[in-house]
Image: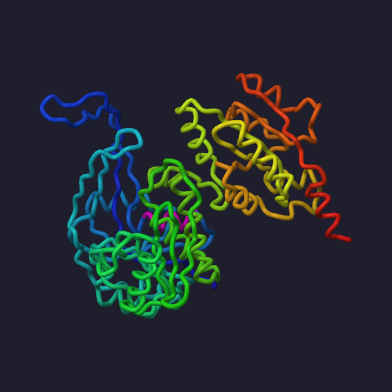
């Protein structure tokens, strides 16, 4: 569908005050934060809008109440050139959230600005944009925007599908919206009668919320467990998250909702939109979260290298051995499985380095790969003896090995007696290249040839 993605909701100014701490104050057991730097970014609906704009060529329009104070001026400057802003006149001050952080950890948050903005009438431009929207994302931060009658009326009349990211202090979604995306804690507060945090409990809450709100579907986001999508009857769909080590989860919900709304704008069905949201949110957290909002993100469906580095760091901290192996793994077959299992037995973790699609084409010819890199990575990560997957674009894994620096590089026995080209790279940091027994009679090329007979 043509038309913009329109984000409606509460725009905040987020500020990170980042410093270092090496001592406590003498009068209380709290850290002294020194050498503080200030980093500003859009928050709330404004963050959702800029994240969406960075991921699409489609126009993104933000409709939000804005006052005329200094915070609003700084927020406008951050949005300039990224999204088209349609402000709603408001009073009460710009909401500002300041996180005091030491390295990657928050130690306190200071909030200022009126908790509820006083809205003026909805501008004609805002109503017109909503009528032409390919999809609408409502980013409710409990500041009163979604409770205004004229805003709700315009949302009900929106032409495209509506994704509603709710807030505990916000208004109920407009009846009939396509998808509502509470997180697990919000769903638990909204449906206190259901106990537990297992999938059965999450599914029961989602089903109850669909009936209560009168909406098409509810996707409950569950952090590292992914998201559960319910249509109110039948078995819910669960979309697992890509494993991520570390990262800043602040803004992950905005990232999820923005990606889901964009997918619906491009014609995806609801399940596809939720899957896209989970993949993008995982990449968002792995890439630094809201703290790195203006940095280019990795492709959402490719397993991110920070996950592999996190695995390696944990193993090294415990004094363990890091093993890596590599290949195209175009069609996973018993020979691959035997080699991978044997490689994992050489140490305390196994990182699999796989060729990107372009790299496979250069090595195997234009008809390969048969399976895309994201799908090859997913299959490999599903194996219990694979701890992480890294996709590389070069013809050999030498560059990625130099970054990861495994203790052992293992290849299948079809290389027996050969001088592995990676061996010289491993030797530069004291690593060892080895060859493992090969399960004869199995290869992707042979499988492809047999399939043609």
Magenta part mainly helix, strand or loop? helix
Q: Where is residue 240 in the image (x, y as percent from the top left)?
A: 49, 57
Is residue 162 visible in the rendered image? The answer is no
Q: Residue at x 66, y 37 (%)?
A: 342
Near-viewer residue (55 or 385): 385
Q: Up-down: is 366 above or below 308?
A: below
Residue 326 image-quadrant placement: top right
Classify residue 321 by image quadrant. top right
Residue placed at 34% from the left, 51% from the top? 42
Residue 52 in magenta?
A: yes
User: The C terminus is located in which quarter?
Assistant: bottom right
Any magenta on residue 50?
yes
Front-lying residue, 254 or 129: 254
Residue 110 visible to the viewer: yes
* Image-based side of 260 in relation to 150, left or right: right
Q: Compared to 347, does 439 lie above or below?
A: below
Provide residue 267's location: percent of width, then percent of height. Answer: 55, 71
What's drawn in magenta, residue-wise? 47-54
Residue 449 % position (x, y): 86, 54
Q: In this view, does 379 lie to the left or right of 193?
A: right
In-front residue for pair 62/423? 423
């Amino acid at each position: 569908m043509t038309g913009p993605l329109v984000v409606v909701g509460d725009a905040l100014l987020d500020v990170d005050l980042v410093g270092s701490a090496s001592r406590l104050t003498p009068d209380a057991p709290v850290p002294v934060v020194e050498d503080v730097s200030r980093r500003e970014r859009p928050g709330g609906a404004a963050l959702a809008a800029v994240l969406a704009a960075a991921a699409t060529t489609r126009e993104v329009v933000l409709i939000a109440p804005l006052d005329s104070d200094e915070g609003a001026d700084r927020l406008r400057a951050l949005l300039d050139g990224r999204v088209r802003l349609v402000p709603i006149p408001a009073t009460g001050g710009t909401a500002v959230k300041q996180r005091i952080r030491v390295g990657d950890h928050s130690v306190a948050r200071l909030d200022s600005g009126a908790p509820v903005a006083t809205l003026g009438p909805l501008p004609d431009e805002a109503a017109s944009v909503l009528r032409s929207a390919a999809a609408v994302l409502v980013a409710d931060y409990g500041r009163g925007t979604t409770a205004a009658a004229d805003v709700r009326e315009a949302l009900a009349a929106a032409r495209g599908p509506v994704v509603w990211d709710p807030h505990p202090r916000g208004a109920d979604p407009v009846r009939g919206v396509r998808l509502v995306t509470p997180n697990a804690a919000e769903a638990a507060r909204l449906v206190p009668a259901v106990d537990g945090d297992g999938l059965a409990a999450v599914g029961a809450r989602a089903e109850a919320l669909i009936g209560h709100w009168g909406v098409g579907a509810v996707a409950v986001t569950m952090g590292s467990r992914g998201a559960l999508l319910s249509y109110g009857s039948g078995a819910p769909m669960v979309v697992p998250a890509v494993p991520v080590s570390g990262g800043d989860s602040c803004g992950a919900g905005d990232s999820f909702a923005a990606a889901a709304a964009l997918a619906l704008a491009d014609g995806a069905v609801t399940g596809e939109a939720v899957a896209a949201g989970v993949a993008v949110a995982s990449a968002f957290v792995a890439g630094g979260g809201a703290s790195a909002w203006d940095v280019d993100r990795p492709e959402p469906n490719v397993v991110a290298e920070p996950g592999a580095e996190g695995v390696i760091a944990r193993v090294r901290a415990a004094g363990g051995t890091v093993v890596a192996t590599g290949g195209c793994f175009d069609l996973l077959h018993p020979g691959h499985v035997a080699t991978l299992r044997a490689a994992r037995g050489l140490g305390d973790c196994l990182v699999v380095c796989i060729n990107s699609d372009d790299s496979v084409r250069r090595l195997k010819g234009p008809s390969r790969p048969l399976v895309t890199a994201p799908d090859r990575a997913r299959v490999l990560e599903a194996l219990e003896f694979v701890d992480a997957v890294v996709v590389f674009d070069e013809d050999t894994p030498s560059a990625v090995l130099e970054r990861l620096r495994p203790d052992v590089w293992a290849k299948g026995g079809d290389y027996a007696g050969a001088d592995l080209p990676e061996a010289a790279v491993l030797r530069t940091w004291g690593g060892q290249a080895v060859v493992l027994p090969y399960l004869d009679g199995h290869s992707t090329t042979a499988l492809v040839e047999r399939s043609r007979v």
